[in-house]
Amino acid sequence: MLVLLPPWVTAASLEETRGAGRRASE
């Protein structure tokens, strides 16, 4: 994982991953 990435970029990536996972599960 890249620690140099800003917090907002990391948060956005996590949100996108969660959203995709939820859609795939449903």
Image (cartoon, rainbow, N blue to C red):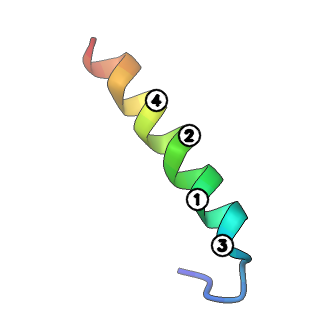
Q: Residue furthest top?
A: 26
Q: Circles 3 and 2: CB distance less than 8 Å?
A: no
Q: Which residue is mark 3?
A: 7
Residue 26 to residue 18: above or below: above
**Amino acid under disc 2:** Glu
Q: Circles 1 and 3: CB distance less than 8 Å?
A: yes
Marking on residue 20: 4
Considering the numbered disc 4 on the image, is that residue within a helix, a strand or a loop?
Answer: helix
Kindly identify the residue that appears in the image at 34 percent across and 25 percent down: 22
Q: Which residue is mark 2?
A: 16
Dot in front, 1 or 2: 1
Q: Is residue 26 left or right of residue 3?
A: left
Q: How many angstroms separate mark 3 from mark 2 (CA)?
A: 14 Å
Q: Position of residue 25 (x, y in %)?
A: 26, 20
Marking on residue 1: none
Dot in front, 3 or 2: 3
Q: Earlier in the sequence, mark 3 or mark 4?
A: 3
Kindly identify the residue that appears in the image at 62 percent across and 83 percent down: 2
Marking on residue 11: 1
